[in-house]
Image (cartoon, rainbow, N blue to C red):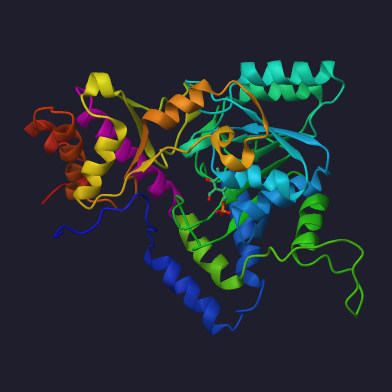
Amino acid sequence: MSLSRVFLSPPHMSQQERALLLDAFDSNWIAPLGPHVDALEKEFAEAVGAEQAVALSSGTAALHLALVLLGVKAGDEVLTSTLTFSATVNAVTYVGAAPVLIDSEPNTWNMDPNLLAEELHACARRNRLPKAVLVVDLYGQCADYGPIRRLCERYDVPIIEDAAEALGASYDGQSAGTFGEVGAFSFNGNKIITTSGGGMMVCRSEEMAEQARFLATQARDPAPHYQHSRIGYNYRMSNLLAAVGRGQLRVLEDRVAARRENYEFYRDALADAPGVDFMPEHPQSRSTRWLTCVTVDPQRFGAARDDVRLALEAENIEARPTWKPMHLQPVFSNCRVRGGEVAERIFRLGLCLPSGSSLTGEDLLRVVDVIRAAGGCRPLEFDLRTALPPKRKAA
Ligand SMILES: Cc1ncc(COP(=O)(O)O)c(C=O)c1O
């Protein structure tokens, strides 16, 4: 295979990260915490408009702490999205609670507010309301928080927002991650910005943020010796990684713009491909298009999702099926589920296309040429080949 590999969503560093990392290194703040952690928390909170931010070792850690902080315990129920990455639902099980899985709606691919209403209604009738609703913002797009928030307020159930995939997105002008009592973000290597591994929890009160920091550093009571009155965790972010995160945060807007440009190019270049549909964007929402996702209808396109994926792989291009819903996962097969058909269809037909912010014009054209050929479409027209965003022009 001669052409270099096109990855799904590789890290994209700028020069600032290197300088900040070296600064952290040279200052010998290597061990946990340090000035870059404090600065990242402050800068991150400002960037998303949250009162408080706590830098952690992963997005999963942020979700786990969110559940602990809201007092979710063994025997409680937590309503959450079935179409997500396993980390969301795993976190619910870490506190011993039972996940209840809610289907997606076709308009956002996120939690269906109507099904949430039905489930909350059924829970209320049983006199057993969930301890929290854990809403996921999928592939860079916020869920439909208007109705979701109204429902949760009516039943007085707190929202935890899993915005691991949606940093930089907004809904009604408000930043992803700030719609619940607590929000969780990921800086995992494939995310829109990365610290190689890391996460951030945002919340509304200083007390809660302080409690999160306490629990994330092994719950050490204030004493000169090591004393513990609670179970703690080792979840804090290192100063070295926080330095990288600060550099990445400064280029977040550029990264969002580049990923949206990828989407716009794919959309235009595949507009005439029958049966290829893009993940919809809700009118109130601005997606980052962290990943550009399509569904491929095999009858109309003439090739199935996996034919397209394998054709791309044969050309050294990475594409992945959309998430397999949690209610279809063996490990969660005992969970209660409301609906499921929408997520199942997205899983059956869905494909995530290469979406990195460092993709070149050649990369984008390679992807589109393979997809068009797989479905027997004629080659891309000259106007569209040359319509790439200025910085991405193919050579
Ligand atoms: C929806 C969702 N939730 C949670 C996570 C977990 O984040 P992390 O990998 O930083 O633990 C991820 C991704 O990794 C994710 O996509």
In this view, the residue in front, 36 or 201, is 201
In this view, the residue in front, 344 or 223, is 344
- Most common secondary structure along the magenta stretch: helix
Residue 391, percent from left and from top: 22, 49
Residue 141, percent from left and from top: 49, 34
Q: Does the magenta stretch include residue 338?
A: no
Q: In this view, does 314 lie to the left or right of 143?
A: left
Magenta stretch in the rendered image: 251-273
> Which residue: 78% across, 46% down?
96
Q: Can residue 393 be seen in this view?
A: yes
Q: In this view, does 106 lie to the left or right of 277?
A: right
Q: Which quarter of the figure has residue 162?
A: top right
From the viewer's perspective, is residue 204 above or below residue 100? below
From the viewer's perspective, is residue 128 above or below residue 246? above
In this view, the residue in front, 340 or 57, is 340
Q: Is residue 272 magenta?
A: yes
Number of marks present in the image shown = 0
Q: In this view, does 318 lie to the left or right of 210?
A: left
Q: Is residue 389 visible?
A: no
Residue 117, percent from left and from top: 69, 17
> Which residue: 68% across, 65% down?
236
> Which residue: 62% across, 20% down?
113
